[in-house]
Image (tube, grey):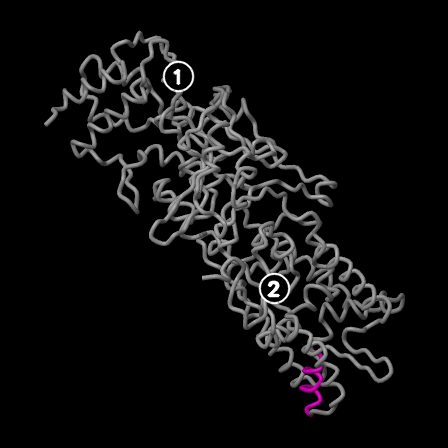
Amino acid sequence: MKTRNDKIAEAKRLSGADGCVECGRCVAACPMAEMYANFSIEMSPRGIIKKTLIGDPVVEDQNIWYCTECNAGTDTCPQGVSCRDLIRKLREAAVSENLLENAKTCKCCGRMFVAIPVENFVYGRLKDEPPNVFGMLDICPPCRREMYLQRNA
Amino acid sequence: MQEPVNEQDFSLKLDDLRPRAPEKKTLSGYFMPPRHSFILFDPEKCTGCGACEMICSTRNTEKVAPASASVKVVTDETQGKTFAILCQHCRKPLCLEACPTRAIEKGKDGIVRIDRLFCTDCGLCTMACPAAAPLKDPKTQAIHKCDLCEGDPLCVKHCPENALTFTRGKAFRWIKGLRWSVQLISFLLLVMVFVGTFCYFKAGEVTLACPTGTLQNIASSGAILLIGGITSALALLILTILAGRLFCGWVCPFGFVLDLVDKITPKKLGWPAFLKSRMTKYGVLAGAVGGSYALGFQAFCTICPIGTLCRSYGVQSFFKSAELAIVPALASLEIAQRRSWCRYFCPVGALLGLTATLRLIKIVIGAKKCKKFSCIQCAEVCPVGIIEADQLREGISPKIPMTECIMCMRCIDRCPYDAAKIRFRWQQAAPGEEKT
């Protein structure tokens, strides 16, 4: 049984977070700044990397659930740190400790497929669309493809 | 006096950097609507071989790796079903709305593209897409979405079973041209050439009469006096039994006026909900017949917009009749909703609707051929609003009430996927559902 510290250590190793030089390029490239009005240094990839490195409690932190797991920060990092992989591993650690309030699970298969704040952003963008769009948002993309097959073929 | 504090937010947003131009409807675009290309998939022919995935991945990664393709073949082993998940290049793409960096744009040629410069591969487009068509490459985590190979799709060329076809929809919307010319000719004939024709027309042995007018005539005179009058009224009813309310959509001169008014009032204000009952027109019909019986003359005919329009032409009657004011008054209802008079009030349409319960044909829209979220043009162009867009989106073939349908055939004309068709009443199958 892995402890939480083991998991964080593994996340650091896999994402190369130790190499972070705090240049802030990932923050500049991060689409979260555009998505959320309350974007802050704690929410930004640099803030989460820093928190992980100095050993603050990061797994319980709500801020790890705002990330869309995009490639922007990973692509732009001069040190090859993958903030995407780090946040993914931190979320995995949080889910294994039953910190599930921000994880959205698929209605069909039960897989966790998106974080609630990210989903709320999509809801906000699609608020003018017909309401049955939102029933569709409860289903994860692979299940949605399966549903599309059943309806059309 | 203190200066008011300006609390305006001066920070730049992506909307300022990448503004989205509003859609402009030009005159040439109206007569020659742009025909956007798309790939049609036929599940009957597909064997699930995956050739499309392989050839598509060579375009994305320069090697054959089906996982990094922009098309995904989903198979159901238990039922033997296969389906290729492809970007449908929606008319109103949801991915475009959801993209946080505005990387997705719909070009003038109708192709929905991802701008690689702005894309961060976050996958929110996959979240927003009803078919989850933008695919995430499991290795590089990049998003791949079909861009139709800029008009020459490889998958279509390499499909061994020809299950994929690249089309641009119908070349020529002939029903539209035919309907407008028939409407114009019948307007000219009914209103200008044979004045008052619609209400009562006699040429030698042939007599034609408005069925609602005949009903009122019978009610007001209190006896079935004119066997000839009833048979002449039957002509329109027989047409309705054969072809639905074809009169309303193609012949009615007031309907033509309403369609013209609709052209100049594209923005609709909406109709108050408490008046939204299609049963009202049957009430108006009953009221017209009952009123004629009580008053002793054809009560509704004096204010009937079709009748006033038909009787209006000519210098004499044009100045004489104040009743002509009824036409612009009722035509102005068009501001609220398309064909609102026909939907809710017209007693002539009500009688034809009652007759249409005996109709021989129906309009069906097959949900399997329909591309659902990407299109829903039929519900938009339907002037009486009887096509349920929500049902189509959920994959159910909507039941079209033929008592309400005015047989304008706009849905058939518009559908690029041949999902809307005319069928005989006893034929159960909708397009795409013939083989079950």
Q: Chain of mark 1?
A: A
Name the secondary structure under disc 1: helix
Rendered image quadrant of residue A117: top left
Q: Chain of mark 2?
A: B
Relative to A93, B165 lies left or right: right
Q: Residue at x 58, y 64 (%)?
A: B363
Pointer 1 residue: A75
Q: Residues within 10 Å of mark 1 (few under 14, many from 20)?
A: some
Please report contact status of discs 1 and 2: CB closer than 8 Å, yes or no.
Answer: no
Instruction: State the extent of the magenta-drawn residues as a range.
Output: B213-223
Determine if the magenta segment contains residue B214.
yes
Overall secondary structure of the magenta section: helix
x, y percent for residue B71: 46, 37
Pointer 2 residue: B422
**Is there any visible trace of residue A71 in the rendered image?**
yes
Q: Which mark is residue B332?
A: none
x, y percent for residue B12: 49, 20
Q: Residues within 10 Å of mark 2 (few under 14, many from 20)?
A: some
